[in-house]
Amino acid sequence: MSDLSSLRVADADREQLIDELREHALAGRLTSEELEERIGGAYSASTRGDLDALRADLPVSSGSVKLALVKRKGQLRRRLAQEVGGSIGVSALSVGIWLAVGAHTPFWPGWVIGVTLLPVIRDAWRLFGPASDLDVVDARLQARHERHLSRGRHGRHRYRGLPRP
């Protein structure tokens, strides 16, 4: 479905719009009559397009910006947690192999741990640190994901003897 305006809305979407409308009324952008009219329209809205029409002539509210930021940060946090899990798994496997062969050599899994966890730690600092930069974290996570996918595709072709695309 490419047209998002025809999607049905939930009560939470209506309540979010009503909160935005109240914020605009407090800022003086809406009169009390306009606020009541738009709140009535929000309660009777059934699609995303109906809700968007009620906020079409208003600037983006700070509440909706904060909500979008919280959602995006949560998505990045989940993606980063997945990468941490993979890094810890590879690191644990390396330590297990080192222990299985007798642990007589220097601790070489330290290199594996450093190489796999360093990018994740850097991105975690960018995400949770004092100067949070969500765009950089998103770009780095996406680049690593695409590299992983491309390696997987090439690996499948190589082992099956098929030519690379």
Image (spheres, helix red, strand yellow):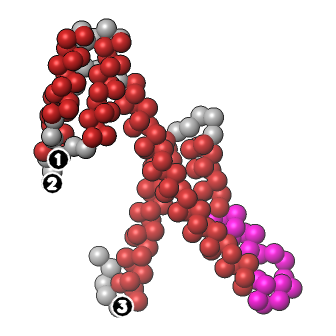
- Tell me which corner region of the image, top left, top right, bottom left or bottom right, holds residue 52: top left
- The correct choice, above or below, for 164 with respect to 58 in the image is below
Q: How far is the residue under mark 3 from the one under mark 1? A: 43 Å
Q: Nearer the viewer, mark 1 or mark 2?
A: 1
- The correct choice, above or below, for 17 with respect to 106 in the image is above
Which residue has dot 1 on it? 7
- Of residues 77 and 145, which is closer to you in this image? 77
- Of residues 164 and 34, which is closer to you in this image? 34
Q: Amino acid at mark 2?
A: Met
Q: How far is the residue under mark 2 from the one under mark 3? A: 36 Å
Q: Is residue 111 magenta?
A: yes
Which residue has dot 3 on it? 160
Q: Amino acid at mark 3?
A: Arg
Which residue has dot 2 on it? 1
Q: Residues within 10 Å of mark 3 (few under 14, many from 20)?
A: few
Asked if residue 133 lies left or right of residue 66, the reply is right
- Tell me which corner region of the image, top left, top right, bottom left or bottom right, holds residue 25: top left
- The correct choice, above or below, for 119 with respect to 102 in the image is above
Identify the residue shown where x is 20% and y is 30%: 42
Write the start and end of the magenta stretch as one range. 98-116
